[in-house]
Image: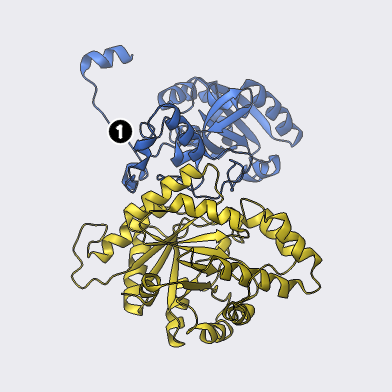
């Protein structure tokens, strides 16, 4: 999921540029799990905004705000409340903010900072394990990603700076290359680690990415 | 063939690290380089060491030639993508810089510009390979470079890494990629050195053993906490702590160590952290045959 954190309230107010009435958007998926843009957070935020003299015309938590058709549907349902607002405040990742922004004429305010693609182990504990680099090396590294979990993204082994097995950049993290080495040893595949990994093809992650595949009619039907 | 390579092939080799200045004035650093130019096989020029901004290592490497010193241009993967790395290497050919020492590079957040974008487009093994290919006249774009020159390519190894088997694997990859010599982190005792030499025995590369003269207890703590992955042995730390003149004691320890390992190693690489001016004195002590 996309991990987000709420912007500082003062910065949020500044970003509202004097709007007197807002419509609030949240996300039922990632931002709910991150407690940045779920039902509860929108209710709390509405109270805070009212205390600042900003009215909230309405709120909506879409199943997944990155699903643009869903967002458009909710915007149609809430047409009057949105029309009565000076701006729409979106408490989701940047993808959600732009779903809304691309679907309304109203000014859109981003209420969160997007941090990373995160795995969740337990509530409010998130870990970055994949950075969507476009060229997955997990089959060569025993299933642990050095592109993401090594701060330097090294592909041919550790930098040599780990102290007692911990990363020199953030000593609270174990060095992923040591973990890869131990995993490969267990799998009896250490010899594979002697293959020199070629430089990464950065075009695989060149921005902005898009996929516009045409589904055959049958699949289109299933997707509905 | 570079002077450094000739030296390494003919006998005991001494290299010294001199960081480029933090401003425009190269005179003080060049003055030291000039004093030692004929006494050492090469001078390492660090590349924004510890992630702190300094003069370009290539520019300062070139200036070393003015005073007759043999530059060893350190090139890290941290600050440049493959375009910039290759264009700087072509630049090195034009500037008469033949020796490379390639490393990953300390992460920016550990330096004085923590907000900087960490690049690491290539890792050290890939950069060694790219440099070796350039030396054979092929760019990373697979295009031929007809007027190519040759680099003498080196790298680094941490002899205190755990698990050492992993560091040895990476070292073998660096050699396969084209590294011909290695410079190590500093050693302070012979037991560690012997263990290390046993591990690298038979590898097709030369090893220059790291030497850092200690100048006081504060430095011992600093190195233990910020640079080394294994602390300085207590008997060495005690010698420094008890000394009336810790700077002289540190130089003595270093000179004794160099003379006692001579004959067993390909050479030494002196990293005189914060006391470049004392390098001529250290070399005098080494020449006087000082031994423990």
In the rendered image, the quadrant that contains the C terminus of chain B is bottom right
Q: Position of residue A89 (x, y in %)?
A: 58, 34
Figure quadrant of residue B259? bottom right
Q: The yellow chain is which one?
A: B
Q: Along the line of sight, which residue is nearer the eye, B200 or B63?
A: B200
Is residue A194 something one can see in this rendering? yes
Q: Where is residue A157 in the image (x, y as percent from the top left)?
A: 44, 44
Figure quadrant of residue B66? bottom left
Label 1: few (<14), some or many (≥20) within 10 Å? few
Q: Along the line of sight, which residue is nearer the eye, A50 or A48?
A: A48
Going by the image, does A191 lie left or right of B259? left
Q: Along the line of sight, which residue is nearer the eye, A185 or B122?
A: A185
Q: Which chain is blue?
A: A
Q: Name the residue under label 1.
A: A211
Is residue B122 something one can see in this rendering? no
Q: Is residue B53 above or below residue A216?
A: below
């Amino acid at each position: 999921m996309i991990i987000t954190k709420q912007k500082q309230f003062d910065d949020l107010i500044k970003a509202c540029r004097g709007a007197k009435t807002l419509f609030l958007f949240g996300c039922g998926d990632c931002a709910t799990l991150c407690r940045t843009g779920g039902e509860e957070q929108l209710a709390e935020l509405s109270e805070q905004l009212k205390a600042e003299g900003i009215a909230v015309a309405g709120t909506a938590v879409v199943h997944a705000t990155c699903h643009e058709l869903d967002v458009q549907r909710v915007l149609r349902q809430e047409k009057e409340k949105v029309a009565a607002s000076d701006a729409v405040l979106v408490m989701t990742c940047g993808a959600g903010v732009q779903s809304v922004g691309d679907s309304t004429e109203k000014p859109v305010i981003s209420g969160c900072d997007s941090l990373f693609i995160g795995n969740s182990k337990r509530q409010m504990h998130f870990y970055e394990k994949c950075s969507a680099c476009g060229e997955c090396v997990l089959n060569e590294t025993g299933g642990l990603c050095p592109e993401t979990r090594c701060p330097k993204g090294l592909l041919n082994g550790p930098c040599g700076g780990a102290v007692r097995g911990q990363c020199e950049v953030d000593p609270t993290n174990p060095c992923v290359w040591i973990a890869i080495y131990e995993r490969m040893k267990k799998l009896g595949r250490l010899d594979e680690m002697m293959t020199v990994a070629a430089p990464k093809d950065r075009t695989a992650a060149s921005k902005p990415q898009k996929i516009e595949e045409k589904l055959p009619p049958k699949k289109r039907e299933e997707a509905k | 063939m570079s002077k450094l390579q000739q030296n390494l092939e003919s006998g005991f080799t001494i290299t010294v690290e001199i960081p480029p200045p933090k401003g425009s004035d190269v005179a003080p650093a060049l003055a030291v380089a000039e004093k030692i130019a004929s006494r050492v096989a090469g001078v390492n020029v660090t590349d924004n060491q510890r992630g702190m901004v300094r003069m370009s290592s290539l520019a300062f490497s070139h200036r070393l030639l003015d005073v007759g010193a043999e530059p060893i241009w350190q090139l890290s993967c941290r600050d440049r993508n493959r375009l910039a790395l290759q264009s700087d290497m072509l630049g090195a050919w034009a500037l008469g810089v033949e020796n490379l020492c390639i490393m990953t590079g300390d992460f920016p957040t550990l330096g004085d510009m923590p907000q900087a974008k960490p690049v690491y487009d290539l890792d050290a093994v890939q950069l060694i390979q790219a440099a070796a290919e350039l030396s054979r006249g092929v760019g990373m774009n697979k295009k031929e470079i007809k007027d190519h020159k040759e680099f003498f390519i080196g790298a680094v190894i941490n002899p205190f890494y755990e698990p050492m088997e992993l560091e040895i694997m990476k070292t073998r990859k660096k050699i396969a990629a084209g590294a011909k010599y290695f410079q190590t982190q500093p050693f302070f005792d012979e037991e560690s050195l012997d263990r290390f030499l046993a591990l690298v025995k038979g590898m097709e590369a030369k090893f220059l053993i790291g030497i850092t003269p200690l100048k006081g207890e504060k430095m011992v703590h600093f190195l233990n906490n910020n640079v080394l992955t294994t602390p300085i042995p207590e008997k060495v730390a005690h010698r420094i702590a008890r000394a009336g003149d810790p700077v002289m004691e540190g130089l003595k320890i270093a000179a004794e160590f160099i003379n006692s390992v001579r004959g067993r190693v390909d050479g030494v690489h002196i990293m005189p952290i914060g006391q470049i001016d004392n390098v001529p004195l250290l070399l005098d002590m080494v020449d006087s045959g000082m031994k423990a």
